[in-house]
Amino acid sequence: MFDLEQIGKAFLVLFAVIDVVGGIPLILQVRQKAGRIYPARATLVSLAIMVTFLYLGETILGVVGVDVRSFAVAGSLVLFFLALEMVLGVRLFKEDTSAPGLPSDDPKVYSIVPLAFPVIAGAGTITTVLSLRAEYARPNILAAIVLNMLVVVVVLLLTERIERLLGRVGLIVLRKAFGIILLAISVKLFAGNITYLFP
């Protein structure tokens, strides 16, 4: 039922997109504003978002008349620009992290917005989960999501220690390395699906 090769590939794609290690400075900023964060809460909310789109995303696409292959091509373009952000150090996407009406000083709120969404399970991650449906079996993607969430909760628990260990330069190098990997993955995803749209 499970294919270790597919799980491994899907895990790497999601790991590069979520980029929780590269997001450590942002996580520290959120912690500074909120006073503390709740790693388990942030992880579970992120997991729920991704699993929801994994199993219901195709139905949602069907309602608007879009097939998975078409979405995969669109998703590959989003991944391409996300990768450019990581490699070139530029900001192409600006996500609204404000939540009107919510108490901004509540650390439980900060653990969901902006930490769970959009930092961990943002537009890029959701797009990736749906795009992977064109390449891999659903149980393998689910396994990759769960494995990534284990990494996320460990990083959230050890954020300050990891930052001290890697240092600012180490975080930048790691981010750029995964950016190049993500760039190659986006090209492969585009090439593998574009031919189905123009038989």
Image (cartoon, rainbow, N blue to C red):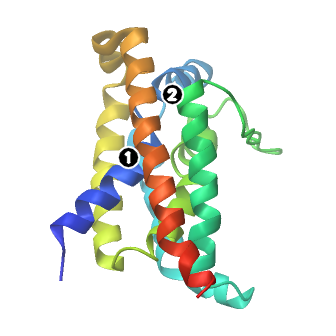
Quarter of the figure with the N terminus: bottom left
- Relative height, residue 55 to residue 87 (above, below): below
- As measured in the structure, the alpha-carbon distance from the residue carrying label 1 to the one carrying label 2 is 16 Å
Quarter of the figure with the C terminus: bottom right
**Can residue 157 be seen?**
yes
Check disc 2 and report the residue beneath it. Answer: 27
- The amino acid at mark 2 is Ile
Check disc 1 and report the residue beneath it. Answer: 15
**Can residue 118 be seen?**
no
Q: Position of residue 187 (x, y in %)?
A: 50, 55
- Relative height, residue 178 to residue 185 (above, below): above
Q: Residue at x 58, y 73 (%)?
A: 194
- Relative height, residue 145 to residue 3 (above, below): above
Q: Residue furthest front?
A: 199
Question: In the figure, residue 85 lies in which quadrant?
Answer: top right
Q: Position of residue 119 (x, y in %)?
A: 57, 41
Q: Position of residue 153 (x, y in %)?
A: 34, 42
Q: Which residue is drawn at 51% across and 20% down?
A: 25
Q: Residues within 10 Å of mark 2 (few under 14, many from 20)?
A: many
> Which label is found at residue 139?
none
Question: In the figure, residue 198 lies in which quadrant?
Answer: bottom right
Residue nearer the viewer, 153 or 77: 77
Q: Which of marks 1 and 2 is nearer the N terminus?
A: 1
Q: Residue at x 28, y 48 (%)?
A: 150
Circle 2 SS class = helix
- The amino acid at mark 1 is Phe
Q: Say which of marks 1 and 2 sits in front.
A: 1
Residue nearer the viewer, 128 or 21: 128
Q: Which residue is drawn at 33% across and 31% down?
A: 157
Circle 1 SS class = helix
